[in-house]
Image (cartoon, rainbow, N blue to C red):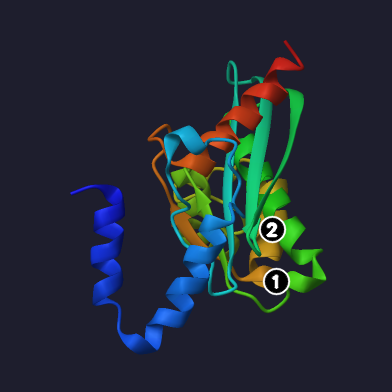
């Protein structure tokens, strides 16, 4: 069965009351209102945002650890995918992953039209995802000490991310890196371009 035949088969199974929203989503795809920078991979965002949600992908990395680093984000909203990136001459992988998430949530916090909308942030860093959704409550309770009683690394960035997380209240999602996920790959490309500026 071809992809078109599969799509037609799925359409036949959609209840009448849901057809209108399904057709609107298809219209957007037909009008190419998505970022086509990686269209050869033919992988769509993990979470569709036809419901008005904002979908974000983030990535960070460096060559050497520490070494020159970069971060990249893609914000998908209202049928458009916008990217942003930055870097530092000497940094660590974890700091770049954190800065990617911080910059992504800063974009949301400073965009009035995004206020009150569902935010889904996809990161390929378990350090970031687990840190902000689980570990950070214990760190704060223990005076920014780990379970081993050592100082939490990158506390400055964690505090900034924590404040943004409380303000924006995104849904955090982990995605596998280097797995052909279109916008994750785009973020990685942005990272590499930033790193190259310092090498």
Instruction: Give the residue at the far left of this rendering.
Output: 1
Q: Secondary structure at mark 2?
A: helix
Location of the C terminus (image quadrant)? top right
Mark on residue 105? 2
* In front of the other: 101 or 133: 101
Q: Residue at x 56, y 31 (%)?
A: 188
Q: Which mark is residue 167?
A: 1
Residue furthest toward the top? 199
Left or right: residue 28 compared with residue 82? left
Q: Residues within 10 Å of mark 2 (few under 14, many from 20)?
A: many
x then y, percent, for residue 173: 45, 57
Circles 1 and 2 in contact, beta carbons < 8 Å: yes
* Visible residue check, residue 159: no
Q: Tell me, yes or no, if residue 146 can be seen here.
A: yes
- Quick one: 166 or 180, which is closer to the camera? 180
Q: Secondary structure at mark 1?
A: helix
Q: In this rendered view, identify the residue nearer to me: 60 or 141.
A: 60
């Amino acid at each position: 069965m071809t992809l078109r035949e599969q799509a037609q088969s799925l359409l036949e199974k959609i209840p009448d009351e849901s057809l209108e929203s399904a057709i609107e989503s298809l219209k957007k795809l037909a009008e190419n209102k998505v970022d086509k920078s990686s269209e050869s991979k033919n992988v769509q965002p993990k979470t569709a945002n036809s419901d008005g949600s904002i979908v974000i992908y983030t990535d960070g990395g460096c060559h050497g650890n520490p070494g020159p680093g970069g971060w990249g984000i893609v914000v998908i909203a209202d049928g458009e995918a916008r990217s942003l990136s930055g870097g530092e001459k000497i940094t660590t992988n974890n700091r770049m992953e954190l800065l990617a998430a911080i910059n992504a949530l800063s974009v949301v916090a400073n965009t009035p039209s995004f206020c009150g909308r569902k935010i889904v942030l996809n990161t390929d860093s378990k350090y970031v995802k687990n840190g902000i959704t689980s570990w950070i409550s214990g760190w704060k309770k223990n005076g920014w000490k780990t379970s081993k009683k050592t100082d939490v690394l990158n506390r400055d960035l964690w505090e900034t991310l924590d404040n943004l997380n409380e303000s924006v209240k995104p849904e955090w999602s982990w995605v596998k890196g280097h797995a052909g996920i279109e916008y994750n790959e785009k973020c990685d490309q942005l990272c590499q371009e930033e790193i190259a500026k310092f090498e």
